[in-house]
Image: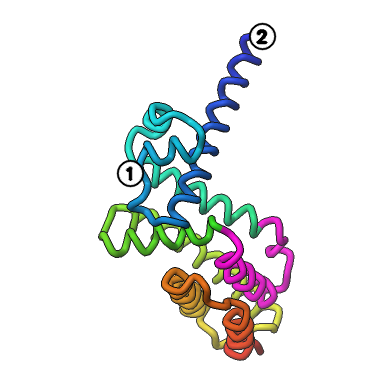
Amino acid sequence: MGVDIARRTQTERRRESELGLLRAAVEVIARQGVGAVTFEVLGRASGFSRGLVTQRFGSKQRLIEALLLHLHEDRQRALAAQGLEAMPGLEAVLAYVDQCLSQLAERLEARAYFTLLSSSVAEGSDLRSAFRRTHAEVEEQLGRWIRKGQAEGGIRGEVDPRSAALMIGCMLFGTSMQMLVDPQMDIAPVRDLSLIALKLSLGA
């Protein structure tokens, strides 16, 4: 029993230190960019040693990959908490877009995610394949809600679910890039107009 408790405590400590380092990486990337991330900087920002960062992740590439997975899972948990799957299809799509655009201004995690995305595109890094996988998941999710909305009669039947899902993703990507260029941008009216545009283009 004592050994099991010790192992569980060690596992918990390891997980807590990893989360602390990932949260520090989120803050550094969101405020200073991907280039500012070094093991020494993360050690100072997190309160852990540089050696622990190396021990936990081994390389900057592995750290960034772990961070991308953490950000994706964080977003999925936030969406799950909103109960989108229980909503009518059109409402789920609108609630998803509403939350994503609101988070651009409110949460460092959203800013860090899109900063990583823009960096991977600019540098042609291997992370692009990881982003393709996460975006494919989102595309499938949006497409499922759109098909559900069509079955319910809330979304026009002639709307192609995949094309609509891609259009929504591109809209979110474009808005996020503008927020990176101009962090002081007022996102509220852009969000409101985006929701109106989606209602008009998708609504039956």
Q: Is residue 19 left or right of residue 93?
A: left
Number of numbered discs overlaid on the protein picture: 2
Based on the displayed image, in which of its 4 quarters is residue 78 positioned?
bottom right
Whether the magenta-drawn stretch holds residue 33 is answered as: no
- Farthest residue toward the top? 2
Residue drawn at (44%, 43%) of the image: 66
Q: Label 1 sits on what residue type?
A: Gln
Residue annotated with mark 2: 2
Q: Which region of the structure is painted magenta?
A: 80-107
Q: Which circle marks residue 61 in the picture?
A: 1
Magenta stretch prevailing secondary structure:
helix
Q: Along the line of sight, which residue is nearer the eye, 63 or 182?
A: 182
Q: Secondary structure at mark 1?
A: helix
Whether the magenta-drawn stretch holds residue 81 is answered as: yes
Residue drawn at (29%, 53%) of the image: 126
Q: Along the line of sight, which residue is nearer the eye, 144 or 83?
A: 83
**Residue 162 appears in the rendering:** no
